[in-house]
Every structure is written in C-alpha cells, then in structure tokens.
Image: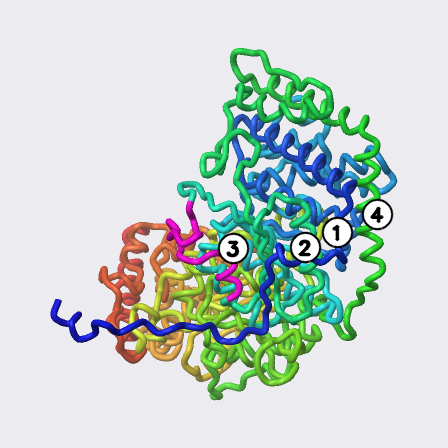
Amino acid sequence: MAENLFFSGIKPSKFSINGKRSEFYDVSDVIMNPKYKPTDEELAFFEKTDLVYRTLCAVLYNFAVESGHPGGSISSGRIAQALVFENMAYDFSDPERKDNDLLSYSAGHKALGLYALWALRNEFVRTGSPSMLPEEKFQLRLEDLLGFRKNSVNSTPLFKKFRAKPLDGHPTPATPFVKLATGASGAGFAASIGLGLGAADIFRSDPPRVNIIEGEGGLTAGRVSEAAASAATSRLNNIVAHIDWNQSSIDSDAVCAEDGKPGDYVQWAPEELFYINDWNVISVHNGLDFFQILTAQKLAQAMDTGQPTAVIYRTVKGWKYGLEGKISHGTGHGFSSPGYYGALDEFEKTFGLKMPRYCSARPDPEAVESCFYETLMTIRGALEKDKDLVETAVSKLAEAKKRLEEKKRKERENAPYLEKAYNLEAEPPSELVFKPGAEIAPGEALALCLKHVNDLTRGGLMAASADLYNSTSAALIGKGFGEEGFYNSVSNPGSRLYSAGGICEDAMGGIMSGLSAFSRHIGVTSSYAAFIAPLEHISARLHCIGEQARKDLTAGYPAPFIMINAHYGPKTGEDGPTHADSQPLQLLQENFPAGSLITLTPWEPSEIWPLLAEALFKRPSVIAPFVTRPAEKIPDRKALGLPDPKLAAKGIYPLMKTGKGSARRGTLVIQGAASASVFVGEVLGELKRAGLDLNVFYVTSRELFNLLPEQEKEKLYPEALAFEAMGITDFTLPTLYPWVRSQEGLKRSLYPFKKGRYPGSGKCEKTLEEAGLDAKTQFKAIKDYALKTEKNKTTEAA
C-alpha cells in the first residue's frame, strides 16, 4: 500500500515498564546463596511424600470411576506439600483458629489433589501422633476418600459404615481448613484476595498468610486480572499466589506465550501478568524440584516490599502419571486399566508391596467400593511400616504449630464486632427517620443505614464500588473511618472503602464475598443493577454454596455479603436501556435455595431500615437491595392512609384494603419504586375518588415473605387473592408469577417489556410513559380490571 512508503525506514520505539514497588527474582540465582539449603533427609521426605500423594491421586480418579482432574492435582502437589509441611504457620489440631495461615485452592478443579493431601496429612498424624487429631468432623480421613464425588444420599456399605464425608467435585468449606467454595475459573482467586483482606484488617501487624493455588489456565479469566490489580493497589502483602504453570488446559498445551512462541489463549507469561500488576514475582524454572520449590517459598516469606507475591512454578501436568499435558486435565486412565496399574508401579516398588487388582468384568458399585477401600488400606499399611516418614511428617506439623505460636498474632484493638449488625431494632435510629416532604435518594438512604451499622460494628462493613462510590452513595458507608480515600494496608488501613480494580463488578463480588467468608466483616458491593446482578451472580452462588457447607461443618451462621443493585429500572431512564435495566431482579429473586439470598425492593426510603434490619437478622449468605437513583420526596404515610413502613419487613404489605361491606373489585400487586411512587402519588387518590375499591399490596421482598410461617403468609396475602390479582412492576413479568397466578391477571399486568421492546432514553416520566407504567396507563388498566372483576362477581352471584 502507498501509505507504507511514508513510514519506511522508521524503527519502532523502545517500550519500558514504569517503576514498580515490587521485585522480581529468579530462583536459579537465589539457590546460589548457601545460607538456605534443605538437607538431603528433608528432600528425601518430600520425594517419598509426593510419591504417596501421586499414588492417591491415581487411586482417587480410578475409583471415582474415571472422574476428577488428575493432571493438575499432580503438577501442583509438590507446591502444596512444601506449604503444608514446611512453610505455613498453622495448628493442624484446630482448623478453625483465626490466626492460621490459609491454603486456598482457587483452582478448584485440583480438589482431587486437595483431598489426597488432606487425607495423607491426617493419616500421618493418626499413625504417628493421634493425640494431635482434632475431633472427627474436623478431620479428612483416609476413609473419607470413599466419598469423593459422592453426595450424602450415597448408600454403598463402606461409605455408610465409616460415615465417610461426601466430597464435592470442587472444594467447599465442608472440608476442614477450606474457607471458600471454588471451581468457577478465577472466582476463587478473587475470593481468596478477600480472605487476605479480612486477615490483613483483623491482624494488622502480622496477618495470617493466604496462599493461593492456581494454574495458568485459571489466570486467563478476566476477573483474575481485576483482582490481582486490586490486591497490589491495596498492598495486601500477606497474599502469596502459587502458580502451577503446566501450560496445559482442557484443549491446549500452549496456554501462554513462552520461549518466543505465541500462546493459544494469551500472549503473556504468568510472571509478566503479575509483575505488570505490581506483585513481587519469584520464577521457579523447575517447579518439580523440591530444592527450588522450598527455596522460592522461603524467599516469598522474606519479601518486605509491602506488595503481594506470586511464585511461578514451571511444571508438567500429569507428571509421572502416564498421561501428560492436556489429556490428563479432566481425564485419566481407564478404570482398572494397565495404565492405572502402571501409575502405581513406583509406589509398589518403593514400598515393596502389591496394590489390589479389580477383577470383575463390570464395575459394580459395591465391589468397586470394596476394592477402593482395600487399596486405601494397603496405602495405610505402607505408611504404618514407614516410621521414619511418619515421624518426620508429624514433626513438621508440630513445627508448623510452633511457628504459629511464636508469631503471637493478636487481633487489633477495636476490631470489628458483627453481632450488633444481626440484632438491629426494627425502629430506625433518630437520624434515619426521614420526615415527610424531605427529599433523599433511596441509594443515599441505604448507604446511611449501612453507615450506621458500620458505626455500631466498629467498622465491620467494607464497601467496594465500580467507580461509582459517590454516584451510588457507597462512599458514605466508610465515612469517618481512616483517612480520606481507599483502604491501603500500609498507608490507610482504617479506611472502609476498598478499591476493587476500577469498573470491575466481577472481581469485586468475589473479593467482598471472600472478605465475608473470613467471617469478621460484611463485604458490600455497589453498582448499576444492570451490571452487578449478572456479573456477581457467580460469586453470589459460590458464596451461598460455601456458607451452606460451612454451616454443615461448624453449625455456625452464614456470613452475608451485601450486593447493592443501584440505579435500576425506569428511574434511570436518561441512561437508556443499557443501564436502566428491568431484568436484574429476575436473576436473583427466588433463584437460590430458600434463605440463602434475600432481595429487597423498597419503594421509598423509610422502608429501607426495617428491611435491612430484618434481612440481617435472617442471616442469609447474600442480601441484594434494589434502590433507585433520583431523590424521592418522603410521603406523608399517615395523611395518605398508608401503614407504618416497619410492615415492609414482612415482604409484602397492604397499601390499600377494601372497605368493610364494600363491593371488592379485585387485587392489585405492585413491585418497584417507579411504579409504586406513580401509583401512590397520582393513581391512589383517583381510585378512591372513582369509588374503585381494591386490595392493593406492595412487595418489598419475596424471600422475606417466604420465610414467614405458612399461617402468617396466608393471613397476609391469601392464596385466593393471587388467583384474581393483576400486577404492576418495574421488573420483568416472571417476577410477578408468585403474586399473580391467573393467565387473565398476567395478561392485564403492566411491566416495562409489555410492548415487546426495551424502552428508550428519556426523563423518568417519559420512560414510564413509553413503557406503559405512567399514571394515565396505570389508572386505565386498573379501572378496566376492577370493572371486569365486578362484572364477573355479579355474573357469578346471579
């Protein structure tokens, strides 16, 4: 092309990276320093431990009848073994100790390896020092491996006999020492950053270290880049990411760029990703060499830059398994195949024994379980005979506790105390009583309520927003805590506003849910409902799963995080349909197991406090309030004949009831601030003047209503009314289904998509008019419905 002639001979400029606070180390240079060198005996211990571990990985995959992820479990095994036996400070006997270092499997598909390592560690202690064992529910025994990828209804004999734990295919807090449900790529990384944030805030001088296990495939998820940026910005120097870079995913053996060759998925190497985000980086060229692994982990502990650290281990997926690379990611050897027995060969030769062979022509569940158990007992027998291996392991676990005790970690003075958040009075504090005629945005009112809770709990709430701290009023939640600006573990540890990487709802949800999972804070996120509901749905779901599992193990209450769905619906009309979205409630309402997520849909600011108080009292895993953007005039509820706003805590309440002895003309159900404010301000009076006597209900929370006793629910909103009702909503038609149960009622209902299209941009009143939610359309629809209902009743009576 002619344009090329203009620029011929011009050389590209040199690009340089701006200076970083972090540092880069090549472990090959570090091991030249003779001050640290593991002994031959230590290396021999780790080599043999890894052999048993790899054997357990092969066994687990085989007897789950070819289910699980053996390759990545094997390639990350040496990294995890070095952590739990050499470098972490924790008390094996007390998995619930808050000052324990944590090992967080962000790469949840490596669960097979996690269970193998946990069971091996437990077996070492059972054999060598049973007094160190915690109570059985806080153990993961060798027998518990019978429950791998099985649930509680499994009825095979040995599973029942040994009360084996059901072990999910990806980790959850049902397993001791595990704080998060992980497995959705990258979500566990963000949540692990949240764990680190919680630890750093409670134990400021020497916080527990959060060690994250992840692979390069998991790093490709965008939420990881978001979370990594936020961790470095906030200087969470108690976080160490351990990256099992085996270069193999499900479909590729060249995930990242390497040695001058482009990657199939991304054009960075893991070292580059972390260093560009201001993490210390330690590069381990041979991530299967215990000398290099142990050296790198010791160096990570010594880093004093104030930045988080990433250790990048170059490994081989499925190393010594007989299948390497992508083929070993989610598949392995066929059941009891020659390949499987080949994977056991090194173990058999080293320990001088023969593993059981499954001889049946068909895998029968009971026979498979019996052979599985016999195989596990063979491994147990090998360990019982190897006293040196067991004694060394027990000694190392005792040293881990000693390291923890020597640190003498203490909670900071005036650390958050959340109990007051869960026992709020239904009556709002005086400063949150909004006087009729005053104007305040619902988002601001919610933030002020949360600010009050933050004061009560000594800063127990930490808020993050997608570059909308002032727009959504989230900044008010942290007012009065720390210096102005965002949380920084070094320069501003008192701030309650967390910088989550910018416009990063995805990572933000993961980080704040992880913060809540540490169980000393309530994480708060805030953005447009249009974006936060879909982008934080995965984090919300995983947090609900995790808190359910934690409750099963500890019998404790869930630790909620709050997802503020701001600027929703027609009242954000100027932004147009990309932002003024009516769909988010449908993504959340009744979309989770009962009691795990509670949505709140107040129509005016006075309802927010009683709703928030009731939701916190119920202790769900997630609370999702929906609030609109413009300032609202506080209605004079007494003058309008409206009930006390405290009734909002029931989930539904009557705005208007039919008079005694009157001819009732049906039932109307409203949900959403725009529809309700138009109805109360412009339609309610017209209905009364027209003599149209209806039951009118407003829905503040479907989930709070569902949690009421059946008798109270029927009294509050009789089922018979649902079969005659019509509805008006700011949201989608399906959100009315619980309240409007007839086809006729649904046909008459008003909702933003009734015309089969997204409304365009405009002032709220114009958006409502286009959507058919304005006062004129509401009145006509209600009048037609009321007259039709009256006619039907007259016909029925005749």
Segment tinted magenta in the rendering: 254-275
- 484 or 174: nearer the eye? 484
Quadrant of the frame with the N terminus: bottom left
Sequence-wise, the earlier of marks 3 and 4 is: 3
- Viewer can see residue 609: no
Task: Identify the residue position indicated by label 1 in the image.
Answer: 37
Task: Identify the residue position indicated by label 3 in the image.
Answer: 187
- Viewer can see residue 723: yes
Name the residue at the bottom extreme: 438
Q: Which is in the foreground here, disc 4 or disc 2?
A: 2
Name the main secondary structure of what is drawn in magenta.
Answer: loop
Q: Amino acid at mark 2?
A: Ile
Helix, strand or loop at mark 2? loop
Sequence-wise, the earlier of marks 1 and 2 is: 2
* Whole-percent x, y for residue 305 in the image: 65, 71
- Disc 4 to disc 2, C-alpha distance: 27 Å
Is 269 included in the stretch rendered in magenta? Answer: yes
* Dots 1, 2 in contact, CB < 8 A: yes
- Give the crowd class for mark 2: few <14, some 14-19, many >=20 residues within 10 Å: some
- 308 or 26: nearer the eye? 26
Sequence-wise, the earlier of marks 1 and 4 is: 1
Q: Amino acid at mark 1?
A: Lys
**Residue 124 is drawn in which quadrant?**
top right
